Image (cartoon, grey):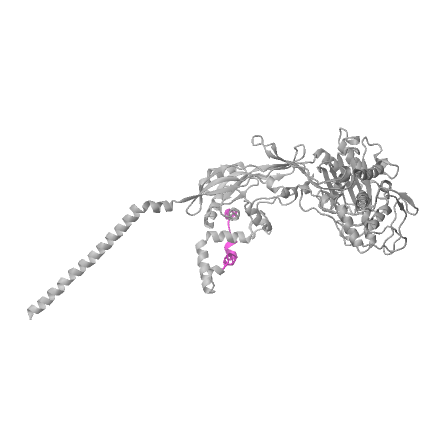
Amino acid sequence: MENKKKNRKDRNKSHIPFRLNLLFFIIFLLFVTLITRLGYLQIIQGEEFKAEVERTESTTVRGNVPRGEIFDSRLRPLVANEAKNTIMYTRGSNTKTENMAQVAGNLAHLIDLPHTSPFQDDDSDLSERDLKDYFFATNDEMMKERIEKHTTENNISESDFSYADQLELINEAEIMDYSDHELKAIAIFTKMNSAYALSTVNIKNNEVTQDEIARVSENIPLLPGITTGTDWDRIYPQEDTLRSILGSVSSESQGIPRQQLNSYLAKGYSRNDRIGQSLLEAQYETVLRGSKSTSKTETDHSGDIITQEEIFSGSKGNNLILTIDMDFQDRVDDILLDVLSKRRGLNESVYAVAMNPKNGDILALSGKKIVNGKVKDDSLGVISNAFNMGSSVKSATVLMGYMDGALTLDNNTIVDTPMRMKGSNNISSVFNRSGSVSVNDITALQYSSNIYMAQIALRMGGYWNYQQDQGVPIDYVDTVDKMRRYYSQFGLGSETGIDLPSEATGQKSTPDNAGQAMFLAFGQYDTYTPLQLAQYSATIANGGTRFAPKLVSEIRETNQDTGEVGSLVKEIEPKIMNTIDISPNLMERVQQGMYQVVNGNYGFAPGIFNSAPYVSAGKTGTAQASYWGENKSRQGESVTNITYVGYAPYDDPEIAIAVVVPYLPNQNTGTVNVDTSRKIFDAYFEVGDYKNDEPTTDEIPEDAGDPLEEE
């Protein structure tokens, strides 16, 4: 019995060491496996993992360069660039906002930047959204917990919880008490956060001091993505001259307008690039923009920028050389200011255009307008404002009559006698209110016969035998359409082709009686712009070739050594819009009619031009119109527009002009249209008051008072 107990006890003792040994053996195998795996990872794959941690990527980043500048025909700057220091930030491909916030905090010790809180000032530099963005970036873990809690409690997915909704989880009390240093950091962070991946934004580019540049440069290692450089501002050395047609450039904060974003991005632009927004700046954007600088940017595995090396410094945009000589332009501006200094009635503006009839070059383009008692440049009004022009269009009417067959050399005499028509206003000519006078194409222009022009319109409608006090049986809609097609060949009522965007073409109403076709024939129905009138004048002057008005004559590069205007890139060739299909002898008859207006024995033009040392031709215009100017309480009132078209020298024209003085009183409009034209010709030929001297015009005071008070 005792032996059995002993054997059982021995068997139990033998199992315990075996189990312990098995356990130790298993542990040993696990340690061997672990050591083997660690050795494999460190020895075999160690370099691979180290490379992954230290992995960097090289990316090309493009930077802005100065725009090309704009010069007059003698290379005097109209639009220039003013260089200035700037502190910039280039955002990495995967840079986290908390990293940007840290850099912003470091930079805030080195530079100054406006940084008032919305809780301190209604007109603050920062918005409540800016403060919340910064709070989110500097409290990332806290915000993750809040978002998780909110989405769980409200049973919504985080993907459906927008960033704007997430910002609502930040209490106002949490963002009210930022220190001055923190507010400055927020201002910097806000600018940094506006950059998208691998794009560059200006942190500060106004009034950057040399001390700030030095401090930032010394601390670049602590400021990943921050660099210093040079930025530019558009300046206007000629101040207000031509300002309204030179156009504008968007700011960096404006960048590319949303509606144009896709087209510009496809051309290699960045979202915050400054682009030409209007007029010349917009028309020649591809010329002025330049070639962007190129930098090789190295980022680490987190997307933060490590180094940035410039590969190509970029090249400034090419320069525009205008057809305008500033000396002549300034004189025309002064002449128009003189007109406004003596304005009467509701007159508040005046316009003048001078063109080279041989190629379409614009020699001067001027508009002056009084707004709120102050004189403003309104050169843009030359292409955007349209008026009834009156008898100055009659040369086109006579040529239209010949082109349509309403006139022939054997049948071009018409008796001028007042017309009384059923269903329309009566028509008469100023020189002949009650009698009967025979006139031909030349004398009809010299004496400015309304009847002659009205009869041309009737003939074009198929009605050759006018009867007093009777209705006029013509298809007036068809007749007006046909007349407009002829007028458009001279530029009246059609696009002129000027190298500016969005020009107006005037107002064309649908006629409702035959009388309106006749009024159209002497400039009392459709409206035209001053530029259209000038193009028409130039077309008559050169014998029938309609050139597109041209503001830019050349495109030139910038000399990299001197910074001045460099070699020729492109010469802008004249553009022919169309030619008038008429024989030279008929064109000469119309030119002779315009010669008689200025050099004959009727009207006031001969008395004004008789002392000129050059021979010119021209045509005056007076139109009854309605006021549609700045004073809304007076809109719709009856006024008179007076105009003039002309060219000189008569036998070999160098200059063709148009002058428009709108909204004068109906009585005693005076001769300001012809006086102004004489002065413009004198200024161009540098004779009279303009011979080796500045023009003698009265200066209009800067504060001109109320321009809408009648005398």
Q: Residue furthest front?
A: 410
Residue 109 visible somewhere in the drawing: no
Q: Residue furthest right?
A: 435
Report the side of 71 relative to 405 (left or right). left
413 lies above or below 686:
below
In this view of the protein, which residue sits in the foreground, 221 or 536?
536
The N terminus: image quadrant: bottom left
82 lies above or below 262:
above
The C terminus: image quadrant: top right
In this view of the protein, which residue sits in the foreground, 351 or 710?
351
Residue 654 visible somewhere in the drawing: yes
- Count of numbered marks: 0
Within the magenta stretch, is there residue 182? yes
Locate residue 94, reporting x and y percent.
45, 49
Q: Residue at x 58, y 40 (%)?
A: 289
Report the side of 390 relative to 505 (left or right). right
Locate residue 144, reporting x and y percent.
44, 57
Q: Quadrant of residue 377?
A: top right
From the image, give the main secondary structure of the stretch colored magenta: helix
Report the side of 359 relative to 122 (left or right). right
Within the magenta stretch, is there residue 160? no
Q: Residue at x 68, y 47 (%)?
A: 502
Report the side of 628 relative to 256 (left or right). right
Q: Residue furthest bottom?
A: 1
Locate residue 670, reporting x and y percent.
84, 42
In this view of the protein, which residue sits in the foreground, 686 or 151?
686
Query: Which stretch is magenta?
Result: 161-185
Q: Quadrant of residue 469?
A: bottom right
